[in-house]
Structures are given as C-alpha cells and as structure tokens.
Image (spheres, helix red, strand yellow):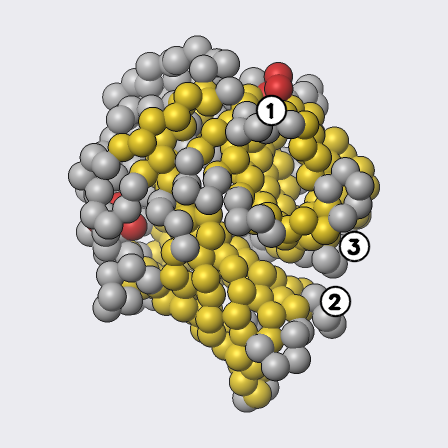
Amino acid sequence: MCLITISKQCVIGAVIALCSCSANPWIEPPLQTSKGYPVPQPDTAIVLPAAHGAHPEYAIEWWYWVGHLEAVESGEAFGFQSTVFRIAGDPSTNVSRFGSAVSFGEQQLFMSHAALSEVSQQRYRSVERVNREGWQARSAQGKLDLRATPIRAHERADGVSFEMDFKLPDTTQVQLELTPLKPIVSFGQRGLSRKGADPAAVSLYWTYTRLQVAGRIIRQGVVTEVEGLAWQDHEIASSQLGADLVGWDWTAIQLDDGTEVKAYRLRTKDGGSDPWSAVYWIDEAAQVRGVYADQFKWQEDDYWISPQTGLRYPTSVSIEATDPRDGQRKVYRLRPLLDAQEFTGNRSGNPYWEGACQVLDGAGRKIGRAYLELAGYGGGLASELR
C-alpha cells in the first residue's frame, strides 16, 4: 500500500500528489548510466510550466495523449492516440544515431505515433514518422511547445490548457483542446517510477489523469465537432527497462465515478511479472495510492492475432486488486472497442497494440473507459530502452 504525501514544492498552479509504495525496498539510483546519460534523481521538484518542456540531456522522453471522444451531434465514438518520443545521441561515443559526430545533447531524434480509432465504423488508422531535430521536429525547453510531424502540441495563452493536433496520411485531421480537470500527479517512490531492479531503470513520470476535451475531426473536408476525456503523460528517463524485462502491459482507466486507475505489468523473460509492477488509484482530489505486484492479479482473458505482423496480443484482460482507499476488492475487465488497433511500427521496428477499451466491473456492468498498451510482443524493445 502506498504512503501518500502532498507537496507544493516549486509548483505553479497545481498540487502534486507523490506516491511512495512501501512494499518494495528503496533502491538509490546512480547519477549516470554506463553511457554517461544523467539518471533521474529522487525528490525532483516539478516546476510548471517548465516540466512540460524538453529535457534533452536525458536519453529518452515522451509526451503521450490518449482519449475517448464522441461527436457532439451524432454520438459517433472515437479513440485517439498521439505520442512523441525524443531520443538523444550517445554521449559515450560522441556519435548520434545518424552516425555523425556531435556534442552532447545534439542531434536529437524525434519519433511520432498517432492513431484514430473510429469505433462506430470499426476502423483504425495510424501514422508513424521519424525526424532529426530541426524544421520537422523540435521541442522547446521551459514549456510545452512541441512539433514532430505530423503532431503539434503547445500550451494555450491561459497557461492552463493545451492544444494538440495531428494529421493522418489520408488527410484526416484531429484538432483538440485539452483542459486538466485535476492537478498533475507523480508516480513512484520519492517521485521516481521504477522499471525493474536495475538501479538506473527509473523515470520521472508526470500525468494529468483527466482532461476535458473539445475539438474537431476533419474527414474528407467534413468537420465533426467532438468532446470527451483524455489522459496525458510525460515521462523522462535514461534507462527504461531492467535487464530481465522484455516489455509491458499498461492501462490508463477513467472510471465513471470521477476516479482513475493506472495499472501495469512489467513482463519478465520467463513470462512472469516484475515485483515493481503496480496498480495506482487517483481519487477525485488527485490523491494517489497503490499496490505492487504481489497485491494484485493481471489476468489475460482473450487474444487477438494480427494479420499484419502475426503477433498474438492479450487484448482482453482483467485486473483484480484490493483498493487501499476503502479495503474493497475491485475487478476491472477491459474489453477492446475494436480488435485491430495495432501500431505496426514500420519505421521503428517495434510493433505494439494500443487501443480504446470499455471497462466492466466483476458483474459485467460498464463502469468506465480505458486505453490499453501491449508492448514488446515482437521482441527487440528491451534493448532499445536500456
């Protein structure tokens, strides 16, 4: 069970909920990785809006949005994903991933993933782009001002909300305004989210678990006004996975009662779950509490086999855990709103399944909605993130 503290350290306009779970021992992170990247340190102050900007000295960071939308007039249902990865050059060799000599922190690589799930039509479309830092890809430091073709995101003039948009290859456009309904939260022990026993496998993990969304989807010149809810992550690390890990199953759940659940299973080479796997509950006041792997069950209920990659994904799962807020045993059954929501990773070489789901309780009643991410089933992911 998590011990919760509330901190207002160097925060502008937000209260940060910090969760430190007492079930696992504290592991002091090193200052640097073996390649010379800095490692995130505990008790890092979160300063807004600077926290939303780029941190180019770290090996990898990503900005991530997912959500469920409905057409204002027709009620047509959609899901969306928008993710930008920033990957730094190697400081130990002074060579970028493009093979040219660089100074530390230069020649950043940006990778963009965007997808739209048209639930009513059972259709999924996605786009992936890879760009060197420059005209097609950049991210400001000090605030959210991000461009990585075909995704753009920036803070609005009110200093509270955001705009994010992307385009698909068939000219479909998704244009959204996102307003946080809760303060930003931080996960893990002393503000560090651990991914295995490797001391360097930690990240700074900052999240808006519930954002109000308004915007439009433009298809073949026809504008559909939409509204809904979104989830926004920003994660910063220099080593994302421990040596024994091959991937993860992860979900962001937004319940109809106004609370959220983040759950993930870090998969080991032998098919088990790493002890640092966790379930977190975020209540209406943005208080965070959680449990680790020995206190919850992640069950695979059904599978989908991709006709494109041949990979087998557990797209229907059940998560069962005792909620530390009330001591009650909770069951969350995730069911995909359409099966074919695989991001094939044609450019990155790492396919994964990322899809919109409905959430049912143990009795089969609908209690919320979620996004489910299933990564590492094609192999090769672990080496990319160490």
Q: Earlier in the sequence, mark 1 or mark 2?
A: 2
User: On residue 122, which mark appears?
Assistant: 2
User: Which residue is at the front of the view, 46 or 275?
Assistant: 46
Amino acid found under the numbered disc labelled 1:
Gly
Q: Answer yes or no: is residue 173 visible.
A: no
Q: What crowding class fits label 1: few (fewer than 14 Cα within 10 Å), some (14-19), or many (20 or more)?
A: few
Q: Secondary structure at mark 2?
A: loop
The number of numbered badges drawn on the structure is 3
- Give how far across and how far down residue 365 sits, in percent: 76, 48
Q: Which residue is mark 3?
A: 307
User: Which residue is at the front of the view, 26 or 18?
Assistant: 18
Measured Cα–Cα span from mark 1 to mark 2: 38 Å
Measured Cα–Cα span from mark 2 to mark 3: 16 Å
Q: Is residue 294 left or right of residue 203?
A: right
Q: What crowding class fits label 2: few (fewer than 14 Cα within 10 Å), some (14-19), or many (20 or more)?
A: some
Amino acid found under the numbered disc labelled 3:
Pro
Q: Quadrant of residue 211?
A: bottom left
Q: Residue at x 52, y 60 (%)?
A: 229
Q: Which residue is mark 1?
A: 327
Q: Secondary structure at mark 3?
A: loop
Q: Nearer the viewer, mark 2 or mark 3?
A: 2
- Give how far across and how far down residue 71 sits, in percent: 60, 75
